[in-house]
Image (tube, grey):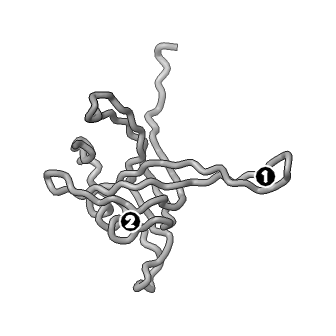
Amino acid sequence: MADLRLPNLNLVLLSGRLVADPELRYTPKGTAVCSFRMAVSKRYKDRDTGEWKDDPSFFNVVVWDRMAEMAGERLRKGSPVMLEGTLKSRSYETKDGSRRYVVEIVSRRLQFLERTPSSDQAPSDSTAGGQDNTEEDPFAT
């Protein structure tokens, strides 16, 4: 069993809506980083009542570089998005000295699913670059 090689696979595909306005910031080196929280619902039929119900899950998402700037400009609470990314875990220390652990989705590709009011084009499908910048901690206080 020790010689078993597992493939390295870390892929997340989600579609849902933002639950709050995104937060766009810049690292000390000037790299854009946008973070937001999104809801993804699983719809199911309750066996007892026969009613359709939603079971929402909430995820923290981080987008880097030019795509972060575009997300900060175009997305608002309720905006529908589809994303492809990877899971990333990190830890940080709070002001009171306790350690917190976070798992978030680092988006590599973000698709805006609704048109901007001034646009007659199809929804944007862009790829976020700059994943090499994730060693900077944009959340450090």
Residue 22 lies in what quarter of the image? bottom left
Task: Give the percent coordinates (x, y) of residue 124.
Answer: 42, 72
Q: Is residue 141 left or right of residue 117?
A: left
Classify 10 Å Cα crowding around label 1: few (below 14), some (14-19), many (20 and above): few
Secondary structure state at the residue bearing disc 1: strand
Task: Give the percent coordinates (x, y) of residue 101.
Answer: 38, 33
The count of marks equals 2
Residue at 40% x, 63% y: name it. Answer: 21
Question: If the image is split into quadrants, where does the C terminus sit?
Answer: top left
Task: Give the percent coordinates (x, y) of residue 94.
Answer: 29, 34
Residue at 31% x, 61% y: name it. Answer: 68
Going by the numbered disc 1, the residue's amino acid type is Lys
Q: Which residue is mark 1?
A: 45
Sequence-first disc among 1 and 2: 1
Classify 10 Å Cα crowding around label 2: few (below 14), some (14-19), many (20 and above): some
The disc label shown at residue 126, or none: 2
Task: Give the percent coordinates (x, y) of residue 103.
Answer: 42, 39
Up the image or down, 118 lies above or below 22; here it is: below
Furthest-top residue in view? Answer: 2
**12 or 89: which is nearer to us?**
89
Q: Is residue 39 left or right of residue 74?
A: right
Q: Label 1, label 2: how many angstroms apart (C-alpha)? A: 35 Å
Choose mark 1 or mark 2, whichever is in front. 1
Residue at 36% x, 54% y: name it. Answer: 35
Up the image or down, 87 lies above or below 64; here it is: above
Secondary structure state at the residue bearing disc 2: strand
Up the image or down, 57 lies above or below 113; here it is: above
